[in-house]
Amino acid sequence: MAKERIVVKIGSSSLTNDKGEIDQAKLMDHVQAIAALRMAKHEVILVSSGAVAAGFARLGYSSRPVTLKGKQAAAAVGQSLLIQTYIEKFSPFNITPAQLLLTRSDFSNQERYQNAFATINELLERGILPIINENDTVSVEELTFGDNDMLSALVSGFVHANQLIILTDINGIYDGNPKSNPEAKKIHYIKEITDEMIAVTDATGSKVGTGGMKSKLLAAKTAVSLGVPVFIGTGTGDDKLIEVLDGKGNGTYIAKHNFGTINTRKQWIALHSESVGKLYIDNGAEEAILFNGKSLLSAGVIEVKGTFTKGDVVEVFGTKGFLGKGQVKCSSNDLQLDIDSRGVETLEIPIPSTEVIHRDAWVESREMKEELT
């Protein structure tokens, strides 16, 4: 088997017992399976939940806290317990873990986003196992990933993974809730995740985690859109992750999207950047950027809304609506001056057209492109 880059996500329910404490047997099973992947020469990034679940019992809570301060306090205690346990368990396999705690702001800030990418690559090149978790201790409610399912999806696209494996306590996606409906049937393979499928998926999670199958489908949809195939399921034993790569995993496989991968810069523009302005363009510019692989030039811009500077991200609209997002190479003021100058252009003194968005900093709306073709 060729060397692959694998992101493995382990949820709280797969790491803890009913009391919310780290289950040593469960954790060791995961450690041995990850070690087997490493022995097979694969690169592994682990996205691990469990910090809040591991810490709340030490604080005297009878169940996972619901308040922000309670969750942050539990994470502060539990994160150190979790990483300490991983260090101890991986030591016999000569695997050194490295802890990375991320927040939404680490993704929305382009420089920090690029630094995180460089750090993870450096760790992998050095043979280190990155263990990533959301920094629950400082995250605020409106700036969280929602759960580590989505974090694992974003990380898998971010590092251009060959596979995302989401381990949970249910062996895949069902057409109903298998815990309450004995007639529910397992879906072994999903070609495409539809909005209808997400809408009817049971969203109930375990009492020590935050996500359910709905969150996993949403995460899988994101990963697949970034060109990363996904497996959602369970398993036991040293070879459970190897079996997933061999197509023999106990769960549901979600096919790789046919759009291919998206480079790191474009992922940041599409998923994490904040748009600060809007551009409205004519039919010629629309054709150029959507179908001819061209950059957006100022000559095709007919209206500017908002205030932005070079390097900011803006939304671009055509005659039928939203076309995509891009990182501009000029300010809104300069672009407006360019538009205003067209009224005084003469044949003797043509006004040159400047590049507004380079094609390498442009991410199109695939839905709109499909509608226009």
Image (tube, rainbow, N blue to C red):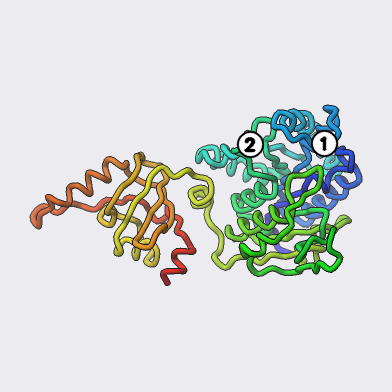
- Give the residue drawn at x 74%, y 35%: 66
- Kindly report the distance in space between the C-alpha atoms of the residues bearing marks 2 and 1: 20 Å
Outermost residue on the right side: it is: 25
As displayed, is residue 265 above or below residue 250? above
As displayed, is residue 30 above or below residue 225? above
Viewer-side label of 2, 1: 2
As displayed, is residue 373 above or below residue 341? below
SS class, disc 2: helix
Residue type at tag 2: Glu
- Give the residue drawn at x 28%, y 40%: 333
SS class, disc 1: helix
Question: Toward the viewer: 17 or 1?
Answer: 17
Q: Quadrant of the N terminus?
A: bottom right
Residue 39 in percent (x, y) is at 80, 53
Decide if residue 87 is in sight here: no
Residue 353 in percent (x, y) is at 24, 53
Disc assigned to residue 54 = 1
Residue 213 in percent (x, y) is at 73, 56
Q: Which residue is mark 2?
A: 141
- Give the residue drawn at x 25%, y 45%: 336
Quarter-of-image position of residue 36: bottom right
Outermost residue on the left side: it is: 348
Question: Toward the viewer: 155 or 238?
Answer: 155
Among the two numbered marks 2 and 1 on one chain, the one whose residue lies closer to the N terminus: 1
Quarter-of-image position of residue 87: top right
Residue type at tag 1: Ala
Question: Toward the viewer: 80 or 93?
Answer: 80
